[in-house]
Every structure is written in structure tokens, then in C-alpha cells.
């Protein structure tokens, strides 16, 4: 993993005031670092705080508590110095302007100190709808245009909130290639998505958010799920004692380190059992387990 953190969040909290004096806590004691040349994924249910975290890092929201540093600067100062590229989950652009005019105005106002990333707009196919007005764009076209603006210039940090929403599969592939190029250039990329397969493919590590808090960090998914049938009540051997087991009568489901697959298979067969399925544990498995932990803890309380 790269050594230099460019984004540092310490005990970040954000509280929104609502009508009738009711306060809503959107973020609570969030700690994490984003490093140069690294893609950090953030996953979690709707309302878990992902978008609020992005907006605080980008400098669009003030913190209620804690601190954020982007390249050693406060978020607003980093934004002023054009260190951050931010893609909002729902881009809001002037509907009346043609795409090509909007693009020219954007580049002019941005006053980039380095050349525009022309490969981004090419990969997103912006030239195919340059004469259309923003209000005439399909949802996919609008997303491609918003991505092009976000990634158009070299930045130290890119914040991508649901970047593949409404994209056709070929543009999803192109975005993966773009992110790989930006990563090699040393950018830190924070990537939020509900597409867990996509997150697993793109990200170096993944943070799971629940109820405004970082619930878990996943550096690598290196375990497997094994399902098998065996006599009721069997006990796992001592060397596999730490394996997580779920039992439904004669059907067992175990989570095991990937290097223990052969040992588990040999044990099941020695018990006159049958292997039903062996598959890598996915981010979806981990997210479901995270949600069930919260549900069970709420039942206990």
C-alpha cells in the first residue's frame, strides 16, 4: 500500500438541524486515510452517511466535530486550490446550455495549470452529443458528461459518488481504465457504489459504513464460503476450530480461509458428507453480515 496519506479524517462528525429543533446525526467519529495511488471503496445502505462524508471532504459541508485534511489543507482551502475533483451522486447542471459550450466555459473557469485529460472525454464519448443541450441528455449521457468534468484535470484527490450510475457496460469498462491511469499518476480516489462486484474489482480496500459510522474495513476478501451436508451434530476438527459455522439440521455453511478449502473438503468426505458449494466470500456476504450484526444487537437492546 502507498505510504503517503493525502486525505486524513479524524473523529469526523456531522449533525444536521431539522425543523422543530430535531437534530439528525449523519456522521459519528469517522476515522480513515486515503493514500496517494490508492482507491478506497465505501459501501453501505442508503442513509449510512457516504454522501455526507464526500461533501465534507470536498469542502461543501462544514464539520460539527473532528477534522479533515486534504494534502495538509482544510477541505475548503484544498477546493480553492483545485486539489479535489468531486462527482455528486446527482449532477445538477444548467439545462439550457449546449454541452460543447458548457465544456468550454468549464475549462475556462477552471483555469487548469496542467493540460486537460483529453483521454477522459474521449473515453466517455462526449463528442457524440456535443451539440445537444444539457436538458436533452439521457441519464447515461449526463453521467458521462459529469464524469468528464470531474476527471478532466489532474487532481490529488477524486471523490466519486456512484460514478457508474446509468452507464452502459462499455463506458463502465472505460471508467475502470481511467481510474487505473489516475491511480498510476498518484491520485487518491475515494469511490462509493452500491455495485459490490465493481467495488471489489476496482478498490484496494473497502470501508463499510453503517448509521454514520465506519463499521468495518476490508483490506482483502481472502476467505471462502463452503456449504455441505453431513450427519447432524458433527464437530469441526481442532485445527478448524476458529471457522465460522452456520447449521440447519444436516446442512452446514462455513466461512474458511482460502488455504483451508482442501482440509474442510477432506473432513466432510471423512464424515460421509457431500459438498454442495464452495465459493469466494464476496463483499455482499460481508455487507449482509454487517447488517445482521446491527439487527441482532438492536434485538438484544
Image: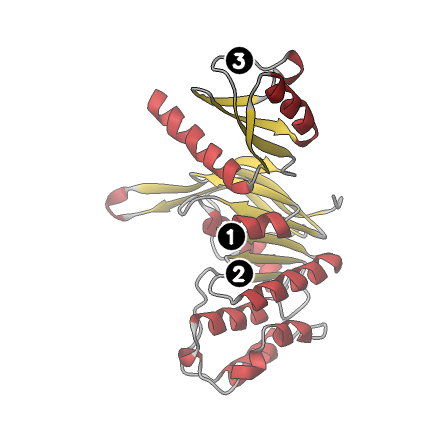
Is 2 on the left-hand or right-hand side of 145?
right
Q: Position of residue 94 (x, y in %)?
A: 43, 77
Q: Position of residue 34 (x, y in %)?
A: 65, 47
* Residue at image point 44% right, 73% down: 93
- Residue 163 shows which numbered tag? 2
Where 256 falls versus 132 (above or below)?
above
Q: Are marks 2 and 1 in contact (CB under 8 Å)?
A: yes
Distance CA(mark 2)–CA(mark 3): 47 Å
> Which of the 4 quarters of the picture holds residue 8?
top right
Q: Position of residue 192 (x, y in %)?
A: 53, 52
Where 258 falls versus 48 (above or below)?
above
Q: Residue furthest front?
A: 272
* Residue at image point 36% right, 26% down: 298
Q: Nearer the viewer, residue 177 or 14?
A: 177
Q: Secondary structure at mark 1?
A: loop
How many marks are shown on the rendered structure? 3
Residue highlighted by disc 3: 234
Amino acid at each position: 500500500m502507498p505510504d503517503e496519506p493525502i486525505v486524513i479524517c479524524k473523529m469526523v462528525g456531522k449533525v444536521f438541524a431539522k425543523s422543530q429543533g430535531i437534530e439528525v446525526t449523519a456522521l459519528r467519529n469517522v476515522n480513515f486515510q486515503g493514500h496517494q495511488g490508492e482507491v478506497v471503496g465505501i459501501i453501505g445502505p442508503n442513509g449510512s452517511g457516504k454522501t455526507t462524508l464526500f461533501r465534507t471532504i470536498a469542502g461543501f459541508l462544514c464539520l460539527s466535530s473532528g477534522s479533515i485534511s486534504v494534502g495538509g489543507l482544510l477541505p475548503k482551502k484544498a477546493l480553492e486550490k483545485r486539489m479535489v475533483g468531486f462527482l455528486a451522486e446527482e449532477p445538477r447542471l444548467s439545462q439550457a446550455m449546449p454541452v460543447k459550450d458548457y465544456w468550454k466555459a468549464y475549462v475556462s473557469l477552471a483555469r487548469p495549470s496542467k493540460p486537460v485529460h483529453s483521454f477522459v472525454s474521449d473515453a466517455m464519448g462526449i463528442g457524440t452529443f456535443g451539440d445537444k443541450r444539457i436538458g436533452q441528455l439521457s441519464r447515461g449521457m449526463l453521467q458521462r458528461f459529469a464524469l468528464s468534468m470531474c476527471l478532466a484535470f489532474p487532481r490529488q484527490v477524486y471523490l466519486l459518488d456512484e460514478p457508474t450510475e446509468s452507464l452502459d457496460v462499455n463506458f463502465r469498462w472505460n471508467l475502470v481504465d481511467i481510474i487505473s491511469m489516475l491511480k498510476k499518476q498518484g491520485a487518491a480516489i475515494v469511490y462509493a457504489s452500491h455495485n459490490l462486484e465493481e467495488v471489489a474489482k476496482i478498490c484496494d480496500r473497502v470501508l463499510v459504513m453503517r448509521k454514520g459510522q465506519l463499521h468495518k474495513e476490508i483490506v482483502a476478501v481472502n476467505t471462502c464460503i463452503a456449504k455441505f451436508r453431513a450427519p447432524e451434530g458433527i464437530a469441526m476438527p481442532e485445527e478448524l476450530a476458529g471457522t465460522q459455522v452456520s447449521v440447519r439440521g444436516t446442512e452446514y455453511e462455513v466461512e474458511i480461509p482460502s488455504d483451508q478449502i482442501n482440509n474442510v473438503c477432506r473432513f466432510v468426505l471423512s464424515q460421509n458428507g457431500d459438498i454442495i458449494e464452495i465459493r469466494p466470500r464476496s463483499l455482499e456476504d460481508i455487507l449482509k453480515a454487517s447488517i445482521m450484526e446491527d439487527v441482532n444487537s438492536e434485538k438484544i437492546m
